């Protein structure tokens, strides 16, 4: 075990301001549920590069019960790889850096112990409760349940549910400022006597954040006077047409640090070490994606598919949204994916002959032994088929959720509000999507990058021109926090080391009879000869264009198809190559596969060959 | 010698085992350190808060919320019966008064002038915690529960349904590779922990439930049968709270798979003895596996028993079970642990090991796809 904090390890707020130009060595960790991942960023010449990575088992649970043990182990591994000492004999991070040892900045994210788990409540499910959910998700929380006056449950069912949950904190919203206080107080009167039990045991006073009608605050204070830790912040819906998530989100981060993290073993020390507040892992991913989208003025979607859950992040027109699809994952939740999607839907993506009964048993075996990996090609093909469905369902949920604007400046009409919940009003528009970033085991560790690209295209169905990339070693959380203390380093590493460009997908939206013309293409690469041809409905084609190369693309769609400028209208663009290249997709949008299993297999077999997916 | 760490399930003839039995909320502990307890003995009890029910009195009386407190015939803290009048409106000149009656019995917790709601709390619910395992109380957690220790035979399964159950062990299958059929379940197995062999069929589980068996243990189950029995498709492996009439545990996995011979032999060696069984499974961080245990004696009196931890080091000669296709369920011994990653049939690169399977065949398997068979 290590000593407490050394004189150099103080609260981030009281540390001297960092001079970005003098920073050479940056260490970052992400403390996950099972693994603590560390990266080293160095100033090489005049630019920042990620140079080493290390990992160690997370040590929040017994026998260690101190997260910093895993952090020190991961940093020690990095030190050995880099030939530089980062940890002193007392087990502390050496700072400031000298010529031979130590680092200048240390930052961390955390999702250990199940991450930040919240319950949210509001008066109307589609309005204040939805805003509360957005605030919680945006802050990186897992929303365990959303309670609303109109959620179709009877009060005693809601109470029963509240009693079953063990949240880290509760966010309550409801009512516009100056409006009726009755309903939001009614919700609070349900929650307080139900006495939701916090995860961290009896001594812990459950934090409640109230972000509703300010006129209700005095009564809310009375209701939560005993046994709770109440914080009142600005209303997240001060008027009906406005959403103001910032104060609630900031308070969630504060409470996460002050209460949740402080109760997790070793976090007091970790907090004292870090130069920026410890962020929930998904919150940091969202931050870096927003920065990139803002800087490059693009629309972007990021996905992280894990064993239990799938996170989807999007930025469209500057509006950020995040969803967590609990129970859509590739190991713990694989059985749930098959149950939700149905097995015939999963098997659409399989070109091999497989026995359904046998597959069902395999799925359950993966669920009960989640750390196993596919050994045979058949097992890999099946897992990648499941992943397409998990991603498709997670994206569908995201599109249905990402319907509203964030931020007080952005106004909507009351008419828009009542229309929300309909998929047609989603702000996610695949035709406007510029960048799709993949992370998570099944996408990151696919033996061929073509497989990663194919999973993304089949699940997300991008339209028009979309750059495909993957997060090389899931560095986005680290860079999200780094961006708050050293934006330049974060951006440089994001560009040079974080993203691996797979290439560009060009897909036509619309439908036609198989074999009929879909679009004509002409590419003039920066190096090499021009290439032209025609795609027919149902075709997929892979054209190699290596990383670093660009090409001038001209696509002329048939009058029934659209590649971004409208049906039949040509589009010219500069596109980027990557480890895969250019994928031309003339299968149509929305993507429809034959119902008949034999027809579907035949078509999949052709597409597998077209994209050189498997040996 | 090359070594690597890999997880495993406990299958042990004798181990010193400790269970922590605690209440969900503070209460009374009914045992003392040093007490000997039986599996079904209560070691702690408490009462949890009763159900709460909001009653909108303002609506019932047809008055503004702020008027409700003044119209109450009962106060916060009063007990009321179902149907009892709790508030009465003033009416018009004392006429046409409306009564609000309590929909159920309980105690009035609060009356809100902001919403006109009365919060009614039902009677407290008793909660008891059993010892679960016969043994000796080695520590008392004040107002919470107790630690109980004993030497036990312990078999961890891979997946189970249903919670804690008790009963004598009865063998339904003579061999571990025999499928557990309904015809093997007899009426004498009422209240027993029935041990099968390979896959348990849906009919066998139904029959076991019919005869009133306490639990069924076998090597595998077909997913389709599990779904038919539960009535739904299980999405995630978090179980234990099902109320399906009995507890069942599979020791190996889903599909046609024989119980490991050692597991079968061990269970067979305790026929007639009382077993404690728990089907609860939780496969997330902090893994919980189902278990079958038989108490052997007082731990303090025995020497040589030791606490076993799950997982351990893989080395040449270690007995392992392959836990993924194409060799799923096969058992063998490690013959090589190459350091360098190898390319698998899937095209992925992973660290592997070589296993000589029972029957003599040698195969290469990813390290992630084996588990230790623990002594």
Image (cartoon, helix red, strand yellow):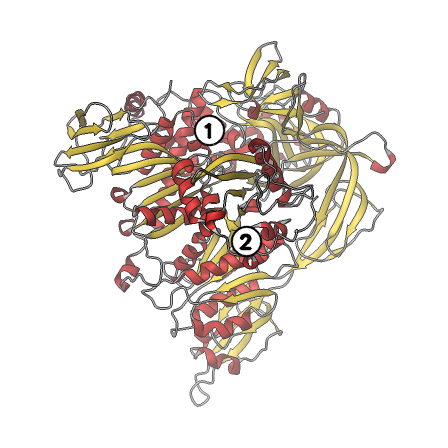
- Give the residue drawn at x 61%, y 34%: B248
Towards the viewer: A501 or A120:
A501
- Give the residue drawn at x 62%, y 73%: B77
Location of residue A280 with respect to A89 vertically, above or below = below
User: Position of A1 compared to A244: left or right?
Assistant: right
Mark 1, chain letter? Answer: A
User: In the picture, residue A420 is in which quadrant?
Assistant: bottom left
In this rendering, does residue B161 appear at all? no
Residue situated furthest bottom in the rendering = B93
Which image quarter is the C terminus of chain A in? top left
Location of residue B214 with respect to A164 vertically, above or below = above
Residue that badge 2 annotates: A165
- Give the residue drawn at x 18%, y 25%: A530
Q: Position of residue B242 (x, y in %)?
A: 57, 43
Q: Earlier in the sequence, mark 2 or mark 1?
A: 2
Q: Position of residue B277 (x, y in %)?
A: 68, 37
Crowdedness of circle 2 by 10 Å Cα count: few (<14), some, many (20+)?
A: some
User: Position of A265 compared to A222: left or right?
Assistant: right
* Labelled disc at residue A360: 1
Which image quarter is the N terminus of chain A in? top right
In this rendering, does residue A261 appear at all? yes
Q: Position of residue A177 (x, y in %)?
A: 39, 72
Crowdedness of circle 1 by 10 Å Cα count: few (<14), some, many (20+)?
A: many
- Give the residue drawn at x 49%, y 58%: A252
Q: Position of residue A366 (x, y in %)?
A: 51, 30
User: In the picture, residue B136 is in which quadrant?
Assistant: top right
User: In the picture, residue A353 is in which quadrant?
Assistant: top left
Towards the viewer: A33 or B253:
A33
Instruction: Give the CA distance from mark 2 to mark 1.
Output: 31 Å
């Amino acid at each position: 075990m290590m000593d407490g904090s050394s004189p150099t390890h103080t609260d981030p707020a009281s540390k001297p301001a960092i001079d970005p130009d003098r920073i050479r060595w940056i260490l970052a960790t992400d403390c996950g549920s099972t693994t603590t991942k560390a990266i080293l960023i160095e100033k090489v010449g005049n630019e920042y590069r990620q140079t080493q990575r290390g990992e160690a088992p997370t040590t929040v649970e017994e026998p260690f019960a101190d997260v910093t043990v895993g952090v020190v182990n991961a940093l020690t591994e990095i030190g050995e790889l880099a030939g530089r000492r980062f940890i002193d004999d007392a087990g502390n991070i050496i700072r400031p850096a000298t010529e031979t040892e130590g680092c200048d900045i240390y930052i961390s994210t955390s999702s250990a112990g199940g991450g930040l788990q919240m319950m949210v409540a509001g008066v109307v499910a589609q309005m204040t409760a939805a805003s509360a959910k957005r605030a919680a998700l945006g802050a990186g929380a897992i929303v365990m349940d959303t309670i609303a006056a109109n959620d179709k449950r009877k009060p005693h069912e809601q109470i029963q549910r509240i009693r079953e949950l063990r949240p880290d904190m509760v966010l309550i919203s409801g009512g516009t400022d100056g409006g009726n206080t009755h309903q939001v107080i009614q919700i609070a009167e349900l929650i307080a006597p139900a006495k939701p039990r916090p995860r961290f045991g009896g001594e812990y006073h459950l934090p409640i954040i109230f972000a509703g009608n300010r006129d209700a605050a005095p009564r809310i204070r009375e209701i939560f006077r005993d046994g709770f830790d109440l914080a009142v912040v600005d209303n997240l819906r001060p008027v009906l047409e406005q959403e103001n998530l910032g104060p609630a989100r900031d308070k969630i981060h504060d409470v996460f640090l002050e209460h949740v993290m402080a109760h997790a073993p070793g976090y007091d020390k970790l907090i004292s070490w870090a130069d920026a507040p410890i962020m929930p892992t998904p919150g940091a991913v969202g931050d870096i994606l927003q920065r990139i989208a803002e800087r490059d003025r693009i629309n972007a979607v990021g996905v992280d598919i894990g064993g239990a859950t799938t996170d989807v992040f999007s930025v469209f027109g500057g509006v950020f949204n995040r969803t967590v699809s609990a129970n859509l994952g590739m190991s713990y939740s694989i059985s749930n994916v098959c149950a939700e999607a149905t097995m015939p839907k999963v098997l659409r993506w399989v070109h091999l002959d497989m026995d359904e009964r046998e597959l069902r048993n395999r799925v359950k075996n993966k669920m009960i032994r989640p750390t196993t990996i596919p050994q045979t090609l058949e097992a890999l093909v099946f897992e990648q088929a499941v992943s397409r469905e998990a991603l498709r369902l997670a994206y569908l949920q995201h599109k249905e959720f990402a319907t509203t604007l964030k931020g007080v400046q952005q106004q909507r009409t009351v008419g828009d509000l009542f229309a929300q919940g309909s998929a047609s009003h989603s702000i996610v528009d695949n035709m406007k999507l510029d960048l799709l970033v993949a992370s998570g085991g099944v996408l990151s560790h696919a033996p061929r990058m073509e497989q990663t690209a194919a999973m993304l295209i089949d699940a997300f169905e991008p339209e028009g021109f979309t750059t495909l990339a993957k997060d090389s070693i899931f560095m986005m959380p680290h860079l999200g926090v780094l961006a708050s203390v050293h934006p330049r380093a974060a951006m440089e590493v994001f560009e040079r080391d974080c993203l691996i460009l797979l290439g560009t997908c060009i897909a036509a939206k619309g439908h036609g009879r198989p074999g009929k013309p879909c679009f004509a293409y002409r590419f003039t690469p920066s190096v090499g000869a021009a290439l032209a041809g025609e795609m027919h409905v149902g075709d997929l084609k892979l054209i190699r264009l290596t990383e670093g190369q660009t090409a001038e693309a001209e696509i002329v769609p048939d009058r029934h198809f659209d590649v971004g400028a409208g049906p039949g209208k040509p589009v010219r663009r500069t596109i980027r190559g990557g480890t895969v290249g250019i994928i031309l997709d003339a299968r149509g949008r929305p993507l429809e596969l034959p119902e008949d299993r034999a027809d579907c297999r035949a078509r999949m077999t052709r597409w597998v060959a077209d994209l050189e997916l498997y040996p | 010698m090359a070594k690597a760490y890999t997880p495993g399930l406990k299958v042990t003839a004798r181990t010193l085992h400790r269970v922590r039995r605690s209440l969900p909320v503070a209460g009374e502990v009914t045992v003392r350190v040093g007490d000997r307890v039986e599996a079904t003995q209560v070691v702690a009890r408490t009462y949890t808060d009763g159900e709460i029910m909001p009653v909108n009195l303002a609506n019932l009386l047809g008055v503004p919320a702020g008027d409700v407190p003044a119209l109450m015939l009962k106060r916060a803290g009063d007990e009321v019966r179902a149907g009892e009048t709790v508030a009465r409106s003033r009416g018009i000149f004392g006429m046409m008064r409306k009564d609000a009656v309590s929909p159920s019995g309980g105690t009035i917790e609060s009356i809100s002038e902001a919403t006109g709601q009365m919060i009614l709390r039902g009677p407290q619910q008793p909660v008891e915690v059993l010892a679960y395992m016969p043994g000796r109380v080695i520590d008392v957690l004040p107002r919470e529960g107790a630690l109980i220790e004993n030497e036990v035979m312990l078999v961890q399964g891979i997946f189970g349904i249903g919670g804690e159950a008790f009963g004598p062990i009865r063998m339904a299958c003579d061999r571990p590779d025999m499928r557990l059929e309904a015809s093997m379940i007899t009426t004498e197995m009422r209240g027993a922990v029935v041990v099968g062999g390979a896959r348990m069929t849906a009919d066998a589980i139904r029959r076991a439930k019919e005869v009133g068996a306490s639990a069924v243990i076998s090597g595998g189950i077909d997913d389709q049968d599990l779904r038919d029995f539960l009535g739904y498709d299980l999405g995630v492996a978090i179980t234990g709270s099902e109320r399906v009439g009995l507890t069942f545990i599979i020791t190996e996995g889903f599909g046609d798979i024989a119980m490991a011979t050692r597991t079968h032999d061990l269970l067979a060696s305790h026929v007639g003895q009382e077993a404690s069984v728990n089907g609860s499974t939780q496969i997330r961080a902090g893994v919980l596996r189902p278990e079958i245990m038989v108490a052997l004696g007082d731990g303090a009196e025995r020497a040589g028993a030791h606490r076993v931890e799950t997982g351990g080091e893989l080395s040449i000669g270690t007995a392992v079970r392959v836990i993924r296709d194409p060799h799923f369920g096969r058992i063998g011994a490690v013959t090589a642990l190459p350091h360098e990653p190898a390319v698998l049939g899937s095209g992925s690169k992973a660290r592997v090991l070589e296993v000589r399977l029972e029957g003599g065949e040698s195969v290469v398997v990813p390290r992630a796809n084996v588990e230790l068979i623990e002594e």
